[in-house]
Image: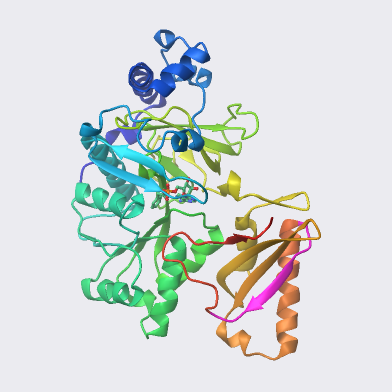
Amino acid sequence: MEKYEVEWWSAKKLKELQSERLKHLVQHITEKVPFYATLFKEKKIDVGKFSSVDDLKHLPFTTKSVIRDHYPFSLFAVPLSDVNELHASSGTTGKLTVVGYTKNDIKVWAEAMARALLCAGVKEGDIIHNAYGYGLFTGGLGIHYGALELGVPVVPASAGGTKRQLMLIQDFKSTVLACTPSYSLSMAEEAREIGVDPFKTNIRLGVFGAEPWTAKMREQIEREWGVLALDIYGLSEVIGPGVAMECAGKNGLHIWADHFLPEVVDPKTGEVLEEGQEGELVITTLTKEAMPLIRYRTGDLVSLTSDICNFCGRTMPRISKITGRIDDMLIIRGVNIFPSQIESALMSIPEVAPHYQIILTTERHLDRMEILVEVVEEVFSDEVKKLEELERKVISEIESTLGISVKIRFVEPKSIERSMGKAKRVIDQRW
Ligand code: DLL
């Protein structure tokens, strides 16, 4: 299988390539996309003077609302006749975020995804069971294109129909499972119910992403499936899955910075942060044709490092595992809380299942948070005293993590809706 040399280039050589690509991008986007032409004019940006990635910080940001305001195609830099494929993500509010791909964009996406799969350790002889949804969501087709590029068989199972998925995994002896981390747990649960031990399937590697998942959740998935569970990152606005991928060293996600130029900024001030500091990931697409984006604010919280990976030796920068999105942050009685903190606390208690939901309501003008926690079957049928003890344990674990008092409610096993894609962890009923 091909080795993508660029992933091992020196920082200097990579910077030269990025600068060259960025220079071209800035010229091109100004000529082709009226939104950027006007914006640069307003901000008095002299695109002719633009010569290196060091100048990037002088360019304005692009936000999700810019994409929505140009619904569906007004941000495209090519005529519609040059667009080969369209995708869209729904988000939680408002209009769809639409993205377009030229033939070459699809080629770049396939390459980025193939590189991600290689980085994860996919090799000849593997069979990829792809249970990411196929459709407007980029997960299914993204993994699919990568597998085709790599020349590894892919089973386009898409999301849903869990029993059939399990049958296919067993009969085809698939070795790689690609789906959201939450769906992999739902699959494992259903497998056991029908007498299939997920540990005994041939699945040896998991390519899990599209939603945040904690280190504890990873441990649980690895235990249940007997796999190496690795994290894949991406977003439709930038290309889809395959923007960044962990190697088996699990020490950050290698971001393909020859195509996707990363920065981390202070979410409040927009100031570029030093390596190692946590902030909002901003990406400039260096090679996208149909819908290039300058300094796109992903909303995802990470830190960045350019140290060489001590596991695989790749020199590409790495982002830390995503802890959450800025808009996921809940402010409860003035305290900033991320669902991932609650997940970490819950996952350290073996008697509770890895399925939970956070319900937010308003009570006497104040935010109220209740956490629905599923307990495992054996505990649920235990006597009340034991359940009370467990409740105290869960509350103390969460309170010591969050620093505020919380209310929890135990619910029956399997009563929290299982996701086949991105899990819905927060139900916001506040007004
Ligand atoms: O979720 C693309 C994707 C598909 C990535 C399959 C990985 C695997 P969107 O639907 O546009 O695209 O959602 C993008 O999902 O901004 C993050 O907030 C979140 N996200 C994606 N990957 C991860 C991850 C796809 N590994 C949004 N960890 C992003 C945490 C993730 N969050």
Describe the colour scheme in one phrase.
rainbow
Asked whether 316 falls inside the magenta stretch, the response is no
Figure check: 330 above or below 266: below
- Picture coordinates of residue 208 (x, y %)? 41, 57
Image position of 126 (left or right of 366): left
The answer to which quarter of the image holds residue 215 is: bottom right
| Magenta-span inclusion, residue 408 | yes
- The percent position of residue 188, horizontal first and vertical second, equals 42, 74
Q: Which residue reaches farthest right? A: 364
Q: Is residue 184 above or below residue 404?
A: below
Judge by depth and name the residue closer to the eye, 425 or 77: 77
Question: In the image, 296: left or right of 32?
Answer: right
Which sits in the foreground, 245 or 144? 144
Task: Write down the region rendered in magenta.
Answer: 403-413
Whether residue 1 appears in this view of the structure is yes
Snapshot quadrant of residue 284: top left
Q: Is residue 246 visible?
A: no
Q: Position of residue 309 (x, y in %)?
A: 44, 41
Instruction: Give the residue displayed 47% in from the left and 13% down from the top.
Output: 41
Closest to the observer, 184 or 250: 184
Residue occupying image coordinates x 46% and y 38%: 68
- Determine whether, in the image, residue 423 is placed left or right of residue 315: right
Q: Quadrant of residue 385?
A: bottom right
- Considering the image in quadrants, where does the C terminus appear? bottom right
Q: How many numbered marks are there? A: 0
**Percent x, y of residue 104:** 23, 34
